[in-house]
Amino acid sequence: MNDPSERVAGDFNMEVPTATPGEFQPLKLGALNIWPPVILAPMAGVTNLAFRSLCREQGAGLFVSEMITARGFLNGNRLTNLLASSAPNEKPRSIQVYGSDPIDLSEMVRALVDQGVDHIDLNLGCPVPKVTRTGGGSAIPLKPRLVARLVRAMTGAAGSVPVTIKMRKGISSELLTFVDAARAAEAEGVAAIALHGRTAEELYSGKADWNAIARLKDVVSVPVLGNGDIWECWDALRMMRETGCDAVVVGRGCLGRPWLFRELAQVFEGLEPDRPPNMGEVAGVMRDHAARLADLFGPAMGLRQMRKWTTWYTKGFRGSAQIRGRLHMIESLGELDELLGELDSEEAFPQSALRTSRAKRGHRQKVRLPEGYLDDLQDDTPPKGPHTPEEIAAYERALEGG
C-alpha cells in the first residue's frame, strides 16, 4: 500500500480519506452496474476509441464516445461512423448522441441498439454559438416539453438499453433550466441525468457549482451524475460526499492523464493511489496513444490528431515549452520519440500540472439564441438542425469547440 504521507495532491486534498467499505455503491443504469461510479465525459475531438481504450485499461467505469451527430450517422458519413466505432472488447459500449429532431434520434437509437450499444446519452449541454443560435445544445433545456419529446423518442426506441442526458445548469444565472428539464426527462424514462455545474454563459470559467448537483439530487429520483472540476481522484470523493450524487463525470481533468482513472479506481477501493508517472513513463503513454490514433485514423491523420495531445501530456514538465512548437508539427512516431528524448525522463510529474486547465479557455460568452426563442418556452417544435453533408461537417467542426 502506498504511503499517505507521500500523497501527490492539492493542499486541500491532502487529508481527504479514501473510500470506506460500502461507502459508495455501483452506478446502476438499466442492467449495467458501473464500478467504480466514474464516467469518462464525452468530449468532441477527444473521446474516440483510441483515448477510450487507454482510459479503460487503467480502471473500470463507463467510457462515453464523443458526440455523434444523428443526421451524420444516419447519412452514413464516413468520419461520423468512424468516431462511433468500437472494438470487440469495449464493454459496456457507450455512445453520446447529438440531435434535435425526434425522428432522427429515434432512428439512430434503433440502429445503435441493433449494433449492440449498451448505453446512449443525449447531449443537451453544448454551449457552442453555432449550435445554440439554431436552438440546439444547451438551448434545448429552456423548453421542457421539447426535452420530453426528444427523450421520449429515444427511450421509446431504446427498449432495455438505458438512455441518459447530459446538460448544464442553464444559459446564464438568470436563465437556469436544469430543474425543469430534469423533471421532464425523468417523466419520459431517462435512466440518469448528468449535470455540469456551470452555465453555457460560463463555458469552462470559474468554479463549478456543486450545490446545483446537490439540488438536482433533491429534485429527481433517478441517479444524478456530477460533472465539473474533477482534477484529482480526491475531488471525485469530495463531490460525492458533498452532493450525494451517484457517480462522477470526468472531463478536462483527464486530458493527457489517462492514468487518472487508475487513481480513481484505487481510491474507490479504499487504497492510496499510485504516484503519477514521471516524464519517461508519460512519454511511453504518449507513444502508445499516438500509435492507437494512427491505427484508428491512419498514420497521417492520426499524427495530426496527436499534436494537440502533446501539450496536454507535457504540461508543466521542464523544457516542454521549448519543444512544443515542434511537437505540434510531428508527422511520424519517430519524430515524437526524438523530441520527447530531449526531456528529462526521470523528472517527477509536476504537482502544478494536477489542476492546470486543459483544452478550454477560461473566458465567458454571451449565448446566442434564435430570435424570439424565449417567447414561448412551452413550445416543443424541434429546431432546424444540419441536414446536408456540408452543414453536418460544419456542425461537427463546431462541436469540437464545446
Image (cartoon, rainbow, N blue to C red):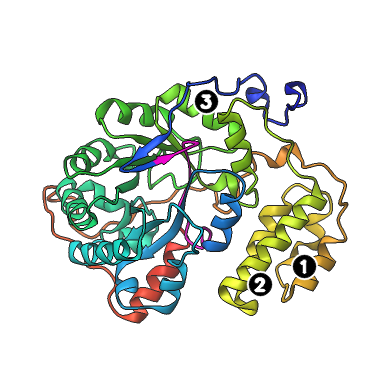
Q: Which residue is mark 3?
A: 238
Q: Which residue is mark 2?
A: 303
Determine whether the residue tagged by mark 1 lies in a helix, strand or loop: helix
Q: Residue at (62%, 41%) from the top-left corner?
A: 262
On the image, the x and y values in percent for residue 265 come to: 58, 36
Is 349 above or below relative to 396? above
Can you tell which quarter of the image residue 266 is in? top right
Determine whether the residue tagged by mark 2 lies in a helix, strand or loop: helix
- Asked whether residue 291 is drawn in magenta, I would say no
Is label 1 in contact with label 3 (beta carbons under 8 Å)?
A: no
Magenta highlight range: 33-48
Is 366 above or below relative to 16? below
Q: Residue at (14%, 51%) from the top-left corner?
A: 375
Q: Quadrant of the N terminus?
A: top right
Q: Residue at (34%, 76%) from the top-left corner?
A: 391
Is label 2 in contact with label 1 (beta carbons under 8 Å)?
A: yes
Can you tell which quarter of the image residue 179 is in? top left
- Which mark is drawn over residue 336? 1
Which tag, 2 or 1, sits closer to the chain's start?
Answer: 2
67 horizontally vs 382: left or right: right
